[in-house]
Image (cartoon, rainbow, N blue to C red):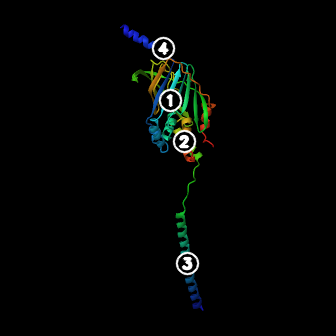
Amino acid sequence: MKKYILSVLVAVAFSLNGVASNDVEVFENLSNKDMQNEKNIQIIPEEKTCGQKYLEDFERLENLGLTFEAAGAIAFHNFQKCTGTL
Amino acid sequence: MKKIIFLILFTFHLYGQINSAKVKYNLIIGQDEKISQDERMGALFEKAQNGSKKISFSLVFNKKASLFSVNEMIEDEDTSLAKIFSGANSTFYTEVGTEKKIKQTEGAFGKFIINYTHRTDWKLENESKLINSYLCYKATSELIVTNSKGTFKFPVTAWYCPSIPFSYGPNGYDGLPGLILELHERFTVYGVEKIDLSTNEIVIEKPTKGKNVTQEEFNEIVKKPPTF
Protein backbone atom coordinates (compact mmCIF):
# COMPACT_ATOMS: atom_id res chain seq x y z
CA MET A 1 0.00 0.00 0.00
CA LYS A 2 2.80 2.33 0.94
CA LYS A 3 4.63 1.51 -2.27
CA TYR A 4 1.49 2.21 -4.21
CA ILE A 5 0.99 5.59 -2.57
CA LEU A 6 4.65 6.44 -3.07
CA SER A 7 4.60 5.57 -6.74
CA VAL A 8 1.44 7.64 -7.20
CA LEU A 9 3.11 10.56 -5.49
CA VAL A 10 6.19 10.21 -7.68
CA ALA A 11 4.03 10.04 -10.79
CA VAL A 12 2.13 13.13 -9.72
CA ALA A 13 5.36 14.92 -8.91
CA PHE A 14 6.78 14.18 -12.37
CA SER A 15 3.60 15.25 -14.09
CA LEU A 16 3.51 18.49 -12.13
CA ASN A 17 7.09 19.17 -13.07
CA GLY A 18 6.19 18.76 -16.70
CA VAL A 19 3.26 21.11 -16.31
CA ALA A 20 5.49 23.59 -14.52
CA SER A 21 8.05 23.29 -17.27
CA ASN A 22 5.37 23.88 -19.81
CA ASP A 23 4.14 26.85 -17.84
CA VAL A 24 7.65 28.22 -17.60
CA GLU A 25 8.14 27.64 -21.26
CA VAL A 26 4.83 29.30 -22.06
CA PHE A 27 5.63 32.12 -19.68
CA GLU A 28 9.05 32.56 -21.26
CA ASN A 29 7.53 32.48 -24.72
CA LEU A 30 4.95 35.02 -23.65
CA SER A 31 7.71 37.21 -22.14
CA ASN A 32 9.75 37.02 -25.30
CA LYS A 33 6.74 38.02 -27.35
CA ASP A 34 6.10 41.00 -25.08
CA MET A 35 9.70 42.13 -25.47
CA GLN A 36 9.45 41.78 -29.21
CA ASN A 37 6.24 43.78 -29.20
CA GLU A 38 7.93 46.45 -27.10
CA LYS A 39 10.74 46.65 -29.61
CA ASN A 40 8.15 47.19 -32.36
CA ILE A 41 6.45 49.99 -30.43
CA GLN A 42 7.56 53.40 -31.66
CA ILE A 43 6.84 56.40 -29.56
CA ILE A 44 5.75 59.13 -31.90
CA PRO A 45 6.39 62.58 -30.42
CA GLU A 46 3.45 64.91 -30.45
CA GLU A 47 3.65 67.24 -33.47
CA LYS A 48 3.89 70.90 -32.55
CA THR A 49 1.46 73.28 -34.15
CA CYS A 50 2.67 76.15 -36.31
CA GLY A 51 1.48 78.53 -33.64
CA GLN A 52 3.60 76.78 -31.00
CA LYS A 53 6.62 76.95 -33.30
CA TYR A 54 5.95 80.68 -33.81
CA LEU A 55 6.14 81.26 -30.07
CA GLU A 56 9.33 79.20 -29.77
CA ASP A 57 10.96 81.10 -32.63
CA PHE A 58 9.85 84.41 -31.18
CA GLU A 59 11.45 83.60 -27.83
CA ARG A 60 14.60 82.36 -29.54
CA LEU A 61 14.91 85.59 -31.52
CA GLU A 62 14.39 87.72 -28.42
CA ASN A 63 17.27 85.84 -26.77
CA LEU A 64 19.40 86.84 -29.77
CA GLY A 65 18.72 90.49 -28.99
CA LEU A 66 16.24 91.29 -31.72
CA THR A 67 13.37 93.75 -31.27
CA PHE A 68 9.78 92.60 -30.88
CA GLU A 69 9.17 93.78 -34.41
CA ALA A 70 12.04 91.87 -36.01
CA ALA A 71 11.35 88.77 -33.90
CA GLY A 72 7.71 88.84 -34.95
CA ALA A 73 8.54 89.29 -38.64
CA ILE A 74 11.08 86.44 -38.71
CA ALA A 75 8.89 84.12 -36.64
CA PHE A 76 6.04 84.88 -39.03
CA HIS A 77 8.27 84.03 -41.99
CA ASN A 78 8.77 80.56 -40.51
CA PHE A 79 5.08 80.40 -39.62
CA GLN A 80 4.18 80.95 -43.27
CA LYS A 81 6.53 78.14 -44.33
CA CYS A 82 5.02 75.90 -41.68
CA THR A 83 1.46 76.56 -42.83
CA GLY A 84 2.48 76.28 -46.49
CA THR A 85 1.42 79.84 -47.27
CA LEU A 86 4.91 80.94 -48.32
CA MET B 1 43.68 134.02 -53.53
CA LYS B 2 40.66 135.79 -54.93
CA LYS B 3 39.75 132.65 -56.83
CA ILE B 4 39.83 130.52 -53.64
CA ILE B 5 37.64 132.98 -51.75
CA PHE B 6 35.24 133.07 -54.68
CA LEU B 7 35.12 129.25 -54.74
CA ILE B 8 34.39 129.02 -50.99
CA LEU B 9 31.70 131.68 -51.19
CA PHE B 10 30.20 130.01 -54.26
CA THR B 11 30.10 126.64 -52.46
CA PHE B 12 28.35 128.10 -49.41
CA HIS B 13 25.98 129.97 -51.66
CA LEU B 14 25.22 126.79 -53.61
CA TYR B 15 24.53 124.68 -50.50
CA GLY B 16 22.54 127.48 -49.02
CA GLN B 17 20.21 127.11 -51.98
CA ILE B 18 19.66 123.38 -51.58
CA ASN B 19 16.06 122.82 -50.63
CA SER B 20 15.74 119.06 -50.98
CA ALA B 21 17.56 115.91 -51.98
CA LYS B 22 17.18 112.27 -52.85
CA VAL B 23 19.86 109.88 -51.55
CA LYS B 24 20.27 106.24 -52.49
CA TYR B 25 21.79 103.80 -49.98
CA ASN B 26 22.90 100.23 -50.40
CA LEU B 27 22.92 97.65 -47.61
CA ILE B 28 25.34 95.10 -46.29
CA ILE B 29 24.43 92.61 -43.58
CA GLY B 30 27.70 91.60 -42.00
CA GLN B 31 28.65 89.07 -39.38
CA ASP B 32 26.95 88.29 -36.09
CA GLU B 33 28.40 85.24 -34.40
CA LYS B 34 25.49 84.69 -32.04
CA ILE B 35 22.88 84.63 -34.78
CA SER B 36 25.01 82.73 -37.29
CA GLN B 37 25.63 79.94 -34.81
CA ASP B 38 21.99 79.55 -33.84
CA GLU B 39 20.76 76.22 -35.24
CA ARG B 40 17.38 77.57 -36.35
CA MET B 41 18.21 81.15 -37.28
CA GLY B 42 21.70 80.74 -38.75
CA ALA B 43 20.43 79.59 -42.15
CA LEU B 44 17.89 82.42 -42.33
CA PHE B 45 20.60 84.94 -41.46
CA GLU B 46 22.79 83.63 -44.25
CA LYS B 47 19.91 84.13 -46.71
CA ALA B 48 19.48 87.68 -45.40
CA GLN B 49 23.18 88.35 -45.97
CA ASN B 50 22.80 87.22 -49.58
CA GLY B 51 19.63 89.23 -50.01
CA SER B 52 21.18 92.45 -48.68
CA LYS B 53 23.29 92.74 -51.82
CA LYS B 54 20.13 93.00 -53.93
CA ILE B 55 18.26 95.79 -52.15
CA SER B 56 18.62 99.55 -51.87
CA PHE B 57 16.91 102.38 -50.05
CA SER B 58 15.93 105.98 -50.69
CA LEU B 59 16.10 108.88 -48.28
CA VAL B 60 14.09 111.82 -49.57
CA PHE B 61 14.03 115.07 -47.63
CA ASN B 62 13.45 118.79 -47.57
CA LYS B 63 14.22 121.36 -44.87
CA LYS B 64 11.34 120.17 -42.69
CA ALA B 65 11.02 116.40 -42.98
CA SER B 66 12.48 113.16 -44.34
CA LEU B 67 11.18 109.82 -45.59
CA PHE B 68 13.33 106.67 -45.69
CA SER B 69 12.04 103.58 -47.50
CA VAL B 70 13.15 100.51 -49.41
CA ASN B 71 13.26 100.77 -53.20
CA GLU B 72 11.18 98.55 -55.45
CA MET B 73 12.89 95.28 -56.25
CA ILE B 74 12.20 91.67 -57.20
CA GLU B 75 11.12 90.12 -53.95
CA ASP B 76 12.40 86.68 -53.01
CA GLU B 77 13.09 84.92 -49.72
CA ASP B 78 16.62 86.34 -49.44
CA THR B 79 15.59 89.97 -49.96
CA SER B 80 12.57 89.59 -47.73
CA LEU B 81 14.77 88.30 -44.90
CA ALA B 82 17.36 91.02 -45.56
CA LYS B 83 14.70 93.68 -45.04
CA ILE B 84 13.46 92.02 -41.87
CA PHE B 85 16.86 91.46 -40.24
CA SER B 86 18.01 95.00 -41.05
CA GLY B 87 14.85 96.49 -39.58
CA ALA B 88 14.28 98.40 -42.78
CA ASN B 89 11.07 96.73 -43.84
CA SER B 90 9.30 99.87 -42.65
CA THR B 91 9.05 103.41 -43.98
CA PHE B 92 10.50 105.97 -41.56
CA TYR B 93 9.26 109.55 -41.33
CA THR B 94 11.01 112.23 -39.27
CA GLU B 95 10.52 115.95 -38.80
CA VAL B 96 13.02 118.60 -37.82
CA GLY B 97 12.68 119.91 -34.29
CA THR B 98 10.82 116.96 -32.79
CA GLU B 99 11.74 113.56 -31.40
CA LYS B 100 8.36 112.19 -32.48
CA LYS B 101 8.68 109.84 -35.43
CA ILE B 102 6.53 107.56 -37.52
CA LYS B 103 7.15 104.08 -38.85
CA GLN B 104 4.77 102.64 -41.41
CA THR B 105 4.96 98.88 -41.52
CA GLU B 106 3.00 96.21 -43.37
CA GLY B 107 3.15 92.48 -42.78
CA ALA B 108 1.34 89.51 -41.34
CA PHE B 109 -0.48 91.55 -38.77
CA GLY B 110 -1.69 94.21 -41.17
CA LYS B 111 -0.67 97.76 -42.01
CA PHE B 112 0.30 99.98 -39.10
CA ILE B 113 1.39 103.53 -38.42
CA ILE B 114 3.64 103.22 -35.38
CA ASN B 115 4.11 106.47 -33.48
CA TYR B 116 7.28 106.47 -31.43
CA THR B 117 9.67 108.87 -29.79
CA HIS B 118 13.38 108.48 -30.17
CA ARG B 119 16.41 110.67 -29.75
CA THR B 120 19.87 109.38 -30.50
CA ASP B 121 22.55 110.59 -28.11
CA TRP B 122 25.55 111.08 -30.35
CA LYS B 123 29.19 111.42 -29.36
CA LEU B 124 31.14 113.38 -31.96
CA GLU B 125 34.54 111.84 -32.64
CA ASN B 126 37.68 113.34 -34.18
CA GLU B 127 38.00 110.88 -37.05
CA SER B 128 37.15 111.81 -40.61
CA LYS B 129 37.15 110.16 -44.03
CA LEU B 130 36.04 110.80 -47.58
CA ILE B 131 32.84 109.12 -48.73
CA ASN B 132 31.93 109.66 -52.38
CA SER B 133 34.30 112.66 -52.33
CA TYR B 134 32.42 114.19 -49.38
CA LEU B 135 34.40 114.85 -46.20
CA CYS B 136 32.62 113.04 -43.37
CA TYR B 137 33.12 112.90 -39.62
CA LYS B 138 32.50 110.06 -37.22
CA ALA B 139 29.85 109.97 -34.51
CA THR B 140 29.04 107.07 -32.21
CA SER B 141 26.08 105.98 -30.16
CA GLU B 142 24.27 102.86 -28.92
CA LEU B 143 21.31 100.88 -30.14
CA ILE B 144 19.37 99.78 -27.07
CA VAL B 145 16.98 96.88 -27.62
CA THR B 146 14.58 96.06 -24.82
CA ASN B 147 12.41 92.97 -25.06
CA SER B 148 10.97 90.43 -22.62
CA LYS B 149 14.40 88.77 -22.31
CA GLY B 150 16.13 91.92 -21.11
CA THR B 151 18.10 94.86 -22.47
CA PHE B 152 20.69 94.48 -25.20
CA LYS B 153 23.15 97.17 -26.32
CA PHE B 154 24.85 97.34 -29.70
CA PRO B 155 27.29 99.92 -31.07
CA VAL B 156 26.19 102.45 -33.69
CA THR B 157 28.61 104.44 -35.83
CA ALA B 158 27.58 107.17 -38.25
CA TRP B 159 29.66 109.13 -40.76
CA TYR B 160 28.02 112.48 -41.35
CA CYS B 161 28.82 115.24 -43.78
CA PRO B 162 28.57 118.85 -42.51
CA SER B 163 28.77 120.19 -46.04
CA ILE B 164 25.28 118.74 -46.63
CA PRO B 165 23.61 120.51 -43.71
CA PHE B 166 20.56 118.28 -43.24
CA SER B 167 20.38 116.25 -40.05
CA TYR B 168 18.79 113.13 -41.52
CA GLY B 169 19.90 109.56 -42.10
CA PRO B 170 18.81 105.95 -42.71
CA ASN B 171 16.31 104.11 -40.51
CA GLY B 172 15.08 107.19 -38.72
CA TYR B 173 18.50 108.19 -37.37
CA ASP B 174 18.96 111.94 -37.20
CA GLY B 175 20.29 114.72 -35.05
CA LEU B 176 23.81 115.15 -36.43
CA PRO B 177 25.14 118.43 -37.90
CA GLY B 178 25.12 116.97 -41.41
CA LEU B 179 23.62 114.23 -43.55
CA ILE B 180 24.55 110.67 -42.56
CA LEU B 181 26.26 109.05 -45.54
CA GLU B 182 27.23 105.82 -43.83
CA LEU B 183 25.61 104.09 -40.87
CA HIS B 184 26.76 101.00 -38.95
CA GLU B 185 24.12 99.49 -36.68
CA ARG B 186 24.89 96.12 -35.08
CA PHE B 187 25.45 93.86 -38.14
CA THR B 188 24.01 96.21 -40.80
CA VAL B 189 25.80 98.86 -42.81
CA TYR B 190 24.01 101.46 -44.95
CA GLY B 191 26.29 103.16 -47.44
CA VAL B 192 25.53 106.05 -49.75
CA GLU B 193 25.49 105.20 -53.43
CA LYS B 194 24.13 108.37 -55.00
CA ILE B 195 23.18 111.88 -53.88
CA ASP B 196 20.91 114.14 -55.91
CA LEU B 197 20.76 117.63 -54.41
CA SER B 198 18.12 120.02 -55.63
CA THR B 199 17.18 123.66 -55.34
CA ASN B 200 13.59 122.63 -55.88
CA GLU B 201 11.25 121.91 -53.03
CA ILE B 202 10.20 118.23 -52.79
CA VAL B 203 6.99 117.63 -50.86
CA ILE B 204 7.45 115.00 -48.16
CA GLU B 205 4.15 113.41 -47.22
CA LYS B 206 3.63 111.94 -43.80
CA PRO B 207 2.50 108.27 -44.06
CA THR B 208 -1.14 107.91 -43.05
CA LYS B 209 -2.32 104.51 -44.33
CA GLY B 210 -2.55 101.97 -41.55
CA LYS B 211 -3.87 101.55 -38.04
CA ASN B 212 -2.41 104.09 -35.62
CA VAL B 213 -0.65 102.44 -32.69
CA THR B 214 2.16 103.17 -30.27
CA GLN B 215 5.33 101.08 -30.31
CA GLU B 216 4.21 99.33 -27.11
CA GLU B 217 0.82 98.45 -28.59
CA PHE B 218 2.50 97.06 -31.71
CA ASN B 219 4.88 94.98 -29.59
CA GLU B 220 1.90 93.34 -27.86
CA ILE B 221 0.34 92.51 -31.23
CA VAL B 222 3.40 90.72 -32.65
CA LYS B 223 4.01 88.65 -29.52
CA LYS B 224 1.17 86.31 -30.44
CA PRO B 225 1.04 84.12 -33.57
CA PRO B 226 -1.16 85.54 -36.31
CA THR B 227 -4.63 84.12 -36.73
CA PHE B 228 -6.17 83.69 -40.13
- Residue B228 picture location, percent across and down: 63, 43
| Relative horizontal placement of residue A21, taking residue B33 as reference (left or right) | right
Kind of residue indicated by mark 2: His
Q: What is the crowding at mark 2: few (fewer than 14 residues within 10 Å), some, or many (at least 20)?
A: many
- Figure check: B74 above or below A45: above
The chain letter under disc 3 is A
**Chain under numbered label 1:** B
Judged by depth in the image, the label closer to the viewer, 3 or 4, is 4
Query: Can you tell which of label 3 and label 1 is closer to the viewer?
Result: 1
- For the point 54% across and 72% down, which residue is it? A29
Position of residue B136 relative to residue A52, above or below, is above
Asked whether residue B173 appears in the rendered view, the answer is no
What amino acid is at disc 1?
Leu
Give the mark toward the camera: 2 or 3: 2
| Amino acid type assigned to the residue bearing label 3 in the image | Asn
Asked which secondary structure carries label 4, the reply is: helix
Q: Is the Cβ of the residue at disc 2 closer than 8 Å to that at disc 4?
A: no
- N-terminal of the pair, mark 1 or mark 4, is 4
Judged by depth in the image, the label closer to the viewer, 2 or 4, is: 4
Q: Which residue is mark 4?
A: B16
Pick the residue in front: B140 or B79.
B79
Pick the residue in front: A17 or B37: B37
**Residue A22 is at least partly visible in this image:** yes
Q: Nearer the viewer, residue B106 or B167?
A: B106
User: Which residue in the structure is indicated by mark 2?
Assistant: A77
Residue B115 x/y as whole percent? 60, 28
How far apart, in angstroms, are the residues tagged by discs 1 and 4?
Answer: 33 Å
